[in-house]
Image (cartoon, rainbow, N blue to C red):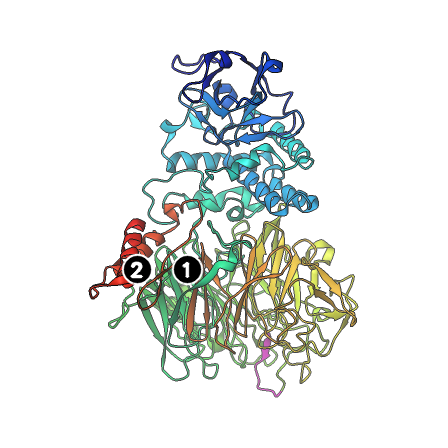
Amino acid sequence: MMAQPQHRLQKPYLAPAVAGVDAGRLANWNLSIERAEGLLADVTLGDLGIAGEIFVKNADAADPNEEPIPVILFLPFTDEEMAGIDAATVRIFRVDEDSDRPKPVWDSGVNAEMGFVWARIRRPGKYVPIGLPRDRLLQHILREIARTRRLAGEDAPREVWAATKRALSVFTEPPAKVVEELREFLTHAEVHTGGGVRQLKPYEIRFSQGAHLTSFPLPHEQPLEEFRSRLRRVAERAMSLPGGMPEEELFYSPDPLPEVPWHRPGVQRPGDDIDWRAVEQLRIWEYVDLSAVLPYLFPQSWWMYQHDLRHTGAASGLSSIRRTSVNRMELNAKVSVDGPIITKPVVVDGKVYVGSGRDYAGTTATLYKIDLVTGDTEGRFPVSGKAHFPGMRGIGGSPAVVGGRVYFTGVHGKVYCVDADTMSNSPPYTAALWETDLKSPCEAQNQPIRQPKGDSWSGPLVVNGKVYVGCGEGEVPQAYGFVFCLDAETGRVLWLFCTCKLTDASDNSPNVIPASVAVSNPLPRWARKAGFRLHDDSNDTTLETGCSVWSSCAYDRVLNRIFVGTGNSQIKVDEPSIGTDLPDELYGSGLLSLDADTGRFCHFFQPGRDDSYQPTDGDVDVAGSPTIFSRDGQRVVAFGSKNGSFFLLDPATLKVLGCDRQRRQLLPRAGGSGLPHDRGTAIRSVAPTVPDGYENFWGVFATPAVHAGTGKLFVGLGRDELADPDRTPFVRALDWNTLEDAWPTAVGPDDVSRYTNASPPLYKTTEAALSSPAVVNDVVFVSTKKAALYALDVQDGHCLWAAPGLPTGEYALGPAIYGDYVVMGAGEYVYIYVLGPRWALIRPDRFVAVAPCRQACPDPPWEGPDLRRLEREKWKAKSEEPTSKPKGLRGVRQLLLKVLSRLMA
């Protein structure tokens, strides 16, 4: 055993806890030390391996009416015993003979420098020090298990075990090398951002050859594979114990543990202290969504459409919004803009970025920068230009905010890059860093396309110094669809890909342009030098156009590919027929994957005729973006179609997973679920397509959201109104493995299955969810065309909260979530909600909101600006406004307001 420093405690002992304790009585207590293995075999991960047993020598002679002696128990530990345990979390637990589970003595703690744990006790017994694993990944896994067990109680063992297995799988299922890589990364992140190696104790740190810092040791310094087996045994054993593993209690201490497990001094902006290049390269992404597993590593920013590169719709960072607290949401600000909002906002570093859309009255629309806390508009960027689609102007896709720059598209076909910090709120407005017109050729921007009818509704995808956007007006002939890749620094076109298949002989190659929409024929020297080539389409009357990119591109870092949905094709010659015969021409009405670096064609998937709700469905665009996620080590790309069908595909091949069974028709059917083995019968009233061959207005128009914690997908249904709301839910909750309903259902007299817990609001109104849902913790937010915003329970679907006072009949395309804030556009307003309640203090003229109640754990400084400090300063300034001399009760109220405001400051 390693020799301990002289100043450290060498042996256990008892000491009086208060003055005046009779020495004779204390001498009657006997203390012995023993090993804890026999007491806690397969019960806990965090015991130190030691235990102290106390008994009274003459217990029979003791006076039963005499008050117990308060004493302090001191138990020394060695470095070997503390190895792999987070010393800061250690408490002493009492082991009762009549209980299998130790109980915490909360009045206990640890002195790491002097090498002992202590507890203030009043009765004899066996006492064992227990802490949490030093490994941060294990800590978060145990926190999630403890939270699930606490919410579910003792009457839901299956639910707890399912959640436990899912949480453990992050540590136990991926290859050992992948888990070890993540553990080592977390160790380096903590050491480099939390104060350095010098603050760590000898039992915490390990080095390999060459003094290379390795991951923190596991409890009892077990090898990873051996510990993973032990972890499974202890988790299974904990299911038979009331309350589970003893260390789960440590998360509910009178002094709660912060969710951010280490201090980051001097961090001002999200991500300043994390090497994101290293995070992105971790192989664990192939198996799990790391932002869901370790949220404290990530900023709260919702920085592009559906939050991230993969469009998961899952909030990152820490948030106190949960099903038990969401009922405290309240309106923080209502901000007026100059036109209806037809996209989702983004929120970065406490600022909301959103654009106005259909500006029928004026000639311009605007990108806004709005302060999340105050609701003040801090910046504007006007855009002008008219789309080919009748009456449409402005911004139709979500911005993307990366590296202090705001990237966004105008419906009129221009892509803009604006500096976020220098946006001005009044004329003269700050000029764009660059802008690229996708309709008009420009040598300076390396843009060779001339296509006046090629509108752009696609929100930018920004990754690896590149900007990906789509364009093409699918509602008119003579307009081809394209995917553009631009340089994020300059806006120059790096490559483009035509989404209309140009020849039957082979798949399209990047940078091949139909001659009718090229800058000229032949191409100018600069275009040929850049690698662009022409395809002669002048005499090809069978070649189809359209195949527009309505959606935003999604990115899979594992394959380095982008995925994007396409609209229906169009015959070049005007014809009275509106719809498209199925199967559609390539690459229409499906999902396309391209190499992110070169634009090389990889794969294309198109729903079949049998996937449509009605056999007469024709205009079946994939209007929403795909979503990419990992489940049990398998990568999946998910998307829905306007024909009502939904698919889970292999990103590498774009083939339907599960032996072609992971596809489902989401619109309700009689006598079946819409799954391949249980198709059921279409109900005409659900999708009354008139005339035949026209578009299905009741299918999937938006992007699903992924809840990794429970393995669920949430998908909105409908565009304007549900034709048969009594049968059709405006949102589906799906199991991400099978696509079966993940909320409780019951079959009605009409032989149609309905969700039992989600009504109301489901099945009560005609409102449709053209929007993309958003999830945070155990809550899913869904907006509808009512307009409405609902918070539903992820687990069973019952409605937890509904936003009051939204305008009627307006598009509300879904919220963005930033910590304890939820932001959504509806009509000509941005609505900012915050988790309350707030303290209401009476002033002579009105009630004043002073400050929101926050979570017990402090917000980490790297999550953005100090929002609480800003609010305190705001209301402090209000309280110090000059007033007339107060008298009586009015004076007392004003004095109370000043005192409280200064205390909060």
Q: N-terminal of the two: label 2 or label 1?
A: 1
Left or right relative to 756: residue 517:
left
- Mark 1, residue position: 347
Residue type marked 2: Arg
Q: Which residue is mark 2?
A: 893
Q: Amino acid at mark 1?
A: Val
Q: Nearer the viewer, residue 318 or 9?
A: 9
The foreground one among 479 and 81 is: 81
Instruction: Give how far across and how far down residue 543 sits, in percent.
Output: 59, 77
Q: How many marks?
A: 2
Whether the magenta-drawn stretch holds residue 574 is answered as: yes
Residue at 28% in and 52% down: 899
Q: Is residue 588 above or below residue 189?
A: below
For this rendering, which residue is in front, 57 or 508? 57
**Magenta segment:** 568-576
Q: Is residue 360 above or below residue 165?
A: below
Q: Is residue 579 visible?
A: yes
Residue 897: x %, y % from top left: 30, 57
Q: Secondary structure at mark 1?
A: strand
Query: Could you tell me which secondary element the residue under label 2 belongs to?
Result: helix
Q: Residue at x 48, y 23 (%)?
A: 70
- Whether residue 788 is in magenta: the answer is no
Dominant SS of magenta comes to loop
Task: Using the rendered image of the protein, determine whether residue 865 is visible from the camera's viewpoint.
Answer: no
C-alpha distance separating marks 2 and 1: 37 Å
| Crowd around label 2: few <14 · some 14–19 · many ≥20 (10 Å) | some
